[in-house]
Amino acid sequence: MLRRRLSSLLLRSPCSSSAVASSYQQQQHLLLPTHAEKPPALNLLRLFTSLAGTDGDRPFIAFVLGGPGSGKGTQCSRIASDFGFAHVSAGDLLRNEIASGTDHGEWILEIIREGRIVPSEITVELVRKAIESSSAKRVLIDGFPRCEENRIAFEKITGTEPDLVLFFDCPEDEMVKRLLSRNQGRVDDNIETIKKRLKVFESLNLPVVEYYSSRGKAHKINATGTEDEIFEAVRKLFSSLRL
Ligand SMILES: Nc1ncnc2c1ncn2[C@@H]1O[C@H](COP(=O)(O)OP(=O)(O)OP(=O)(O)O)[C@@H](O)[C@H]1O
Ligand SMILES: O=c1ccn([C@@H]2O[C@H](COP(=O)(O)O)[C@@H](O)[C@H]2O)c(=O)[nH]1
Ligand SMILES: [Mg+2]
């Protein structure tokens, strides 16, 4: 019974459970996975090894959000080296799944190629495992949660909330310019996919930032200017934290 209830919670299409998502679906339904894209079955019970109960011991968790190309990865590397954080990039975890030829790899690749969001039962599990296997006392989660449904699933499954949410605020034209000159061979760094990622960002990622803003957890950083200039603002914020 419990298992059935939890399965229905987790196996819903990504970001289709909230009011935000359903209005988004009406506008942008082509960007969402179809029923046929339901992932191969996972051992759902494994997902309920939560971080809850270890709350006192759990690391300080910072979610790092921002549009595609806003500089999340670049700034996370610098925070990691200057402030002793482990850097967990949800996008990298998914790309590792593709590269290591897992059961879900091809299916994940298609979703990324189309700029859509991988279902929570995949990403929450990857992120949770990465946090649990890290010995760091401070962890940056880069590029997750991507939508309200991701956020709710993470909080339910891990029994915890982030301590801090960093939001890199960058104009669209600057993000597009950066992505088109990134040159890392990513399947999603082409103008068609970038346009889709920007729509997903605005419709689905931003509500997560708004949610955490309303809880007083989100800190907006102006992500224009040089990497050094942006890091100065980041450094100020992290220096003011009691970590
Ligand atoms: N302040 C900056 N000015 C100019 N270019 C930058 C700046 N910060 C990062 N870049 C470059 O822009 C590109 C995108 O940066 P980065 O990979 O850090 O973004 P991201 O937010 O992680 O993107 P994605 O969501 O696609 O993973 C990279 O080539 C990076 O070197
Ligand atoms: O939580 C996540 C994180 C990422 N994705 C998918 O991966 C790509 C690339 O992510 P980056 O953070 O830009 O590296 C993203 O566009 C999504 O398709 C995801 O679904 N869920
Ligand atoms: Mg990145």
Image: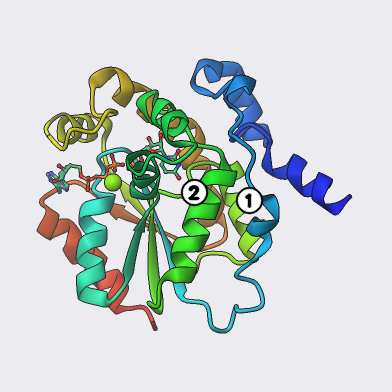
Instruction: Give whichever of discs 1 and 2 has the lower sequence position.
Output: 2
* 1 and 2 marks in contact (CB < 8 Å): yes
242 left or right, relative to 212: left
3D distance between C-alphas at marks 1 and 2:
9 Å
Q: Nearer the viewer, residue 166 or 117?
A: 117
Q: Which of 187 and 210 is in front in this view?
A: 187
User: Residue shown at 60%/67% (left/top)?
Assistant: 160
Which element is circle 2 on?
A: loop
Q: Quadrant of the C terminus?
A: bottom left
Amino acid type at image mark 2:
Pro
Answer yes or no: disc 2 within 8 Å of ligand 2: yes
180 left or right, relative to 122: left
Depicted 97 relative to depicted 48: above or below: above
Q: Mark 1 points at which residue?
A: 153
Q: Mark 2 points at which residue?
A: 145
Which labelled disc corresponds to residue 232? none
Is any atom of residue 150 visible in this view? yes
Q: Position of residue 206 (x, y in %)?
A: 47, 41
Depicted 206 relative to depicted 115: above or below: below
The colour scheme used to paint the residues is rainbow
150 left or right, relative to 141: right
